């Protein structure tokens, strides 16, 4: 595998010169030094000696694609690790077809990891805390806690479903061949991997809320602070991940990666506002229409 790199030495003594493998057809980059391996006919990088085996392989190295062999749990968490800490290895998948269906399946499993704990928390919040922030004075009469909790839960789902697809818009520049655009789009769906870690702050959220609301315990505040800190770290990783992957896949598109980094938080903010406010506005509109007829 790629880890078994030979000792560094002068490029003249590397096996590259002697090999006559077929040239690597696409822009794919050395896992260690980022050298463009396109056209190379050898087994090792001429710059640093790293093995090019992974760039030549026809089999995907994404554990999630082998989940039926190695088990879903292991495949999922090994993929989360790969996406978060080995972006160059993930970018090496550009050397072969990337399964769109597998990428989408990974995305939806990850959305579930983020959505379910937070949805349970929102429902708990609405049931436990009567003077909730959901209760906007004007709306008290029409939007009761269960409705507010339902709308907020729906908003969360809409937000995660749409937000995890947003980075893909930046992964298909038109000057790239279509097959590379498709591979890059599929890989972009893996960048939601940090959301899987929502299971870490979830117990702190779950324990902190009743402690704080029912007993005003300082421990409740501490738990909620820990939860918020973990969620913030997760959000940062989710934000930076697509940028790092795009830099590894298309290093010559630096401006595009910068635009992705700059616009993603604003796009997510607008999406969150739409996802949470739109259902509320629709309900109010329906109520107004209903009231005008009765
Ligand atoms: Zn190299």
Image: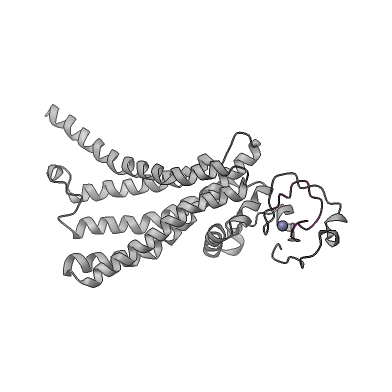
Tell me: residue 280, above or below residue 288: below
Q: According to the image, what is the colour scheme of the structure?
A: one colour
Q: Is residue 170 left or right of residue 217?
A: right
Can residue 148 be seen here? yes
Name the residue nearer the viewer: 70 or 242: 242
Tell me: residue 140, above or below residue 113: above
Q: In this view, does 165 lie to the left or right of 98?
A: left
Name the residue nearer the viewer: 164 or 282: 164
- Which quadrant of the render holds ligand 1? bottom right
**At x 36% / y 48%, what residue is drawn?**
157
From the image, which quarter does the C terminus lie in?
top left
Residue 221 is situated, as x and y percent measured from the top left of the image, at 25, 67
Q: How many marks?
A: 0
The magenta region covers: 35-48
Residue 235 is situated, as x and y percent measured from the top left of the image, at 41, 55
Residue 137 is situated, as x and y percent measured from the top left of the image, at 12, 46
Quarter holding residue 219: bottom left
Quarter holding residue 113: bottom left
> Residue most toward the front?
10
Can residue 106 be seen here? no
> Residue most toward the right?
18
Q: In this view, does 252 lie to the left or right of 45?
A: left
Main structural element of the magenta stretch: helix, strand or loop?
loop
From the image, which quarter does the N terminus lie in?
bottom right
Name the residue nearer the viewer: 55 or 251: 251
Residue 224 magenta: no
Q: Is residue 41 left or right of residue 62?
A: right
Residue 41 magenta: yes
Residue 27 is situated, as x and y percent measured from the top left of the image, at 69, 45
**At x 69% / y 65%, what residue is drawn?**
3
């Amino acid at each position: 595998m790629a880890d078994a790199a030979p000792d560094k030495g002068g490029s003249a003594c590397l096996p590259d010169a002697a090999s006559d493998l077929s040239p690597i057809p696409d822009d794919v980059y050395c896992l260690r030094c980022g050298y463009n391996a396109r056209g190379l006919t050898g087994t090792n990088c001429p710059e640093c000696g790293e093995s090019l085996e992974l760039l030549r392989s026809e089999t995907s190295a994404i554990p999630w694609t082998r989940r039926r062999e190695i088990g879903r749990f292991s495949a999922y968490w090994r993929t989360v690790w790969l996406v978060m800490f080995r972006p160059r290895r993930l970018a090496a998948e550009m050397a072969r077809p990337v399964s769109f269906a597998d990428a989408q399946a990974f995305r939806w499993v990850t959305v579930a990891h983020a959505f379910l704990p937070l949805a349970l928390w929102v429902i708990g919040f609405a049931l436990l805390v009567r003077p909730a922030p959901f209760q906007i004075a004007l709306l008290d009469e029409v939007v009761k806690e269960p409705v507010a909790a339902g709308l907020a839960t729906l908003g969360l789902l809409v937000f995660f479903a749409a937000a995890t697809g947003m980075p893909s818009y930046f992964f298909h520049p038109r000057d790239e061949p279509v097959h590379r655009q498709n591979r890059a789009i599929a890989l972009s769906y893996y960048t939601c991997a940090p959301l899987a870690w929502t299971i870490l702050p979830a117990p702190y959220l779950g324990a902190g809320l009743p402690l704080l609301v029912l007993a005003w315990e300082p421990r409740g505040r501490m738990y909620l602070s820990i939860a918020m800190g973990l969620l913030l770290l997760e959000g940062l990783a989710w934000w930076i991940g697509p940028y790092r992957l795009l830099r590894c896949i298309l290093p010559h598109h630096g401006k595009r990666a910068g635009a992705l980094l700059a616009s993603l938080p604003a796009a997510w903010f607008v999406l969150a506002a739409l996802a949470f406010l739109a259902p509320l506005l629709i309900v109010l509109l329906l109520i107004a229409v209903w009231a005008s007829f009765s």
